[in-house]
Image: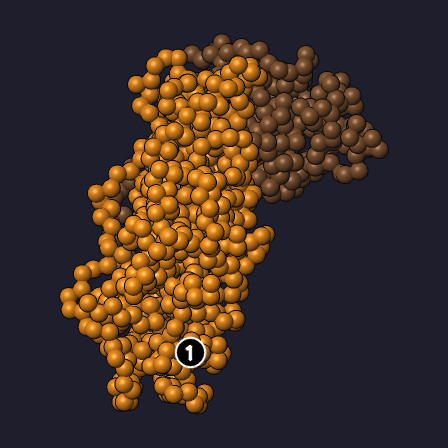
Amino acid sequence: MVTLKDYGEYKTAWCPGCGNFPLLRALKLALVKKGLEPHQILIVSGIGQAAKTPHYLNANVFNGLHGRSLPVALGAKLANPNLIVIAESGDGCMYGEGGNHFLGAIRRNIDITVIVHNNQVYGLTKGQASPTSEEGFVTKAQPDGVFETPFNPLAIAVAMHAGFVARGFVGMEDHLVETIVQGIDHPGFSLIDILQPCVSFNRVNTFKWYRERCIPLPSSYDPYDWEKAMKVAVQWGKEIPIGVIYKNDRPSYEKHFSALKKGPLVRQKVDLSKLKKIMETYA
Amino acid sequence: MDNRCINILIGGEAGQGLQTIGFIFSKGLVRSGYSIHVHQTYESRVRGGHNTYSIRAGVQKVLAPQEEIDLLIALNEETIDRHKEDLSSKGFIIGNADLNRKEKNWIGVPFKTFGDEIYWNTAAIGVAGGLLGLDRRILNKVLGEVLGEEKALKNLSVLEAGYQWLASQSFKWDPLPFISNPSPRFLMNGHEAVALGAISSGLKFCAFYPMSPSTSIAQTLIDWSREMDVVVVQAEDEIAAINMAIGASYAGAPSMVPTSGGGFALMVEAVSLAAISETPVVIVIAQRPGPATGLATRTEQGELLFVLHAGHGEFPRAIFAPGSIEECFYLTRKAFELSEKYQGPMFILTDHFIADSYRDIEPIPVETLSSIRPGLDPNEIESPYLRYRITESGISPRLLPGLSKHLVVADSHEHTEDGHMTENLSIRPKMVDKRLRKGQGLRSEVIPPTFIGEPESEILFVCWGSSRGSVEEVATLLSSSGTKASMLHFSQVWPMIPEQFLHYLEEAKQVISVESNATGQIAHLIRRETGFLIKKRILRYDGLPITPQYIMRHLKER
């Protein structure tokens, strides 16, 4: 039996009260609920306060470059589809620096679960605007407020028919754990955008601010209804819907490769007698 | 031995089937027992423009391209106007009879009588095959293999008509000697050899973003991916490509990324990631003239110093620069072996010239080769497992994630032995030293530069990568005509070990570097590493490869 203890307890570099703490706990609870052991999991992250998360639990880890967690996760999943691959990072890493990879991963529908810590601000670099900061949000680097419209990751993902699109909130633990479990269960690309406060740099979108707005989707909601999902995905303001907004049953990317039908690439031997025949075609 | 060569140039527009008939003719020559060397030029466009496919053929090993043309096959009139000055005194021009050209040795072929315009190229090689005395059955067979039986049908009759038409004429040509029972040879270009060398070493994953002239490596891998169980991903950009390869390699699939200078510029941050995370990855940089977009479909050897210094931070690396098709194959294997053993990025520098230069090579006995096996056996690991355990060799135990209970933690931050990020500044120098110690191992495995010639020669040519053939030919030519000349060719350009070659430089009366770049990059590097100054340099940077004639012209000019 896997327990929370198997995933360990570590000292972190986060501020007291950071939204990363409840997210880390929810992630561990979801993995325990799934009965997964640490060595079955690979967590790939980028750079940022959120991207430090994999250092604070027991799992295989690849902590790479800022913005580049998704291509690393894709490569690892293709090399060994038996790994449960989770890509984890913040809104700046995933939607800003890694924007093109975000679009590429959605289109491919690779079977990975993407956990985005979305606090609408840059934490590690001390308080600049992020791609999801709201228009007019004032920071030291944006003293006249943010001029850009915020990036809506969920609307983009739904518009592109991503495999699984969900939003969570760190203030609703059971709901968040259940959403992460569903994301891991989904056989394809799963995006879970998780709202969380940054206690040091975002004085607008606070814990209270999110708690007053986040409302779970009703149990009657059908996530397979794309048109409805588009409407839900753009909803933001007084009410912010959380839960599984959209999903479909597209085959995942790794299913298309003939090489992978024989099992993981890792440990597959080179058939030199086949290569000999290929070489002979050059005669 | 007959050391004559003939140089055939096929010229025309993009879209006239130049490469197809060039390839068929090349294969026909190799199957007839001749050694060949192909040099292709084309413009950065899909239709139109002026492209060439040159085949130099001989009885003995052909090393380099040749500027003088013995047989000009003109698929359009522009080809004649552009290249007639390069025609040798006994050279022939094959072209459409309707052009009514007045050049001596003009072979006006009534192409119209052979069928639609799309068949004229086949008719031309029929005429050329007849002129060269090639066995038509060999060309017939190759045509069928390349075009597929259905498409070949009409072409076969056109080829035959070409042969017959020539037989009815009275052109005098001194053909290459007939070779009876030739031993089988492979016809392969540089990038095919890189791709096949990679597969033979155990490559399982490749990610790429299309860019000339590197794309042909990925394409060759794709062509054989189903048979050889290789996954090839076309990434959204070069940054993604190399990060995918690093992810795949971390999880246990030997990986490669082919790119060119501009694409490699985007990959540089991840080169550094491979170094600190100690993840094997092989990166091929197919050079073309820069800066920036430069000349997309021409050749240059301009990225040596860029690749040597690419990546922030300090870490060891090896850089290979194959000078032949065989070296493209075997050095790619070496890059994979070193990459796995020393757990980091290793580099191969090719260029546009060698990429699509078809040449004949000895068949490679792949069944006798070994393949790499990534990672260690988890049962032989001492506990606790430390991914970055500090060792004397600097090489730490690499396990693959998910294959045992051991957790494999890899990190781009400076990290502790267990892979977790640290700001403990007493650990930092230990980890830097550990990584750099792998450089000692790399230095002990450097392939020495190839020296051909006699010591204390009057001229020693220093070259690297694809310039080898032309330099070797010139050195041999000069030696046979009374000037003692030698060649020193670097097929591994880094690390550089002075003890392996400095005496050659010091013994020669005159040392000349020969490179396809404007600043003499290997000369700079040798100066930096040995203090030896190579003052004389023959450099070419107009986008065309170094030829023996180019070297000879520049030798005389000084």
Horizontal side of A236 relative to A256 (left or right) equals right
Vertical position of residue A182 compared to residue A26: above or below? below
* Residue occupying the point 74% across, 31% down: A129
Number of numbered discs:
1
* Front in this rendered view, residue B541 or B40: B541
Extreme-front residue of the structure: B509
* Front in this rendered view, residue B432 or A163: B432
Q: Colour of chain B?
A: orange
Coordinates of residue B29 in the picture (x, y in percent): 27, 68
Coordinates of residue B541 in the picture (x, y in percent): 51, 59
Quarter of the figure that contains the N terminus of chain B: bottom left
Vertical position of residue A214 compared to residue B324: above or below? above
Vertical position of residue B193 compared to residue A46: above or below? below
Instruction: Kindly identify which residue carries mark 1.
Output: B74
Characterize the local packing of mark 1: few (<14), some (14-19) or many (20 or more) Cα atoms within 10 angstroms: many
* Front in this rendered view, residue B278 or A102: B278
* Front in this rendered view, residue B533 or A31: B533
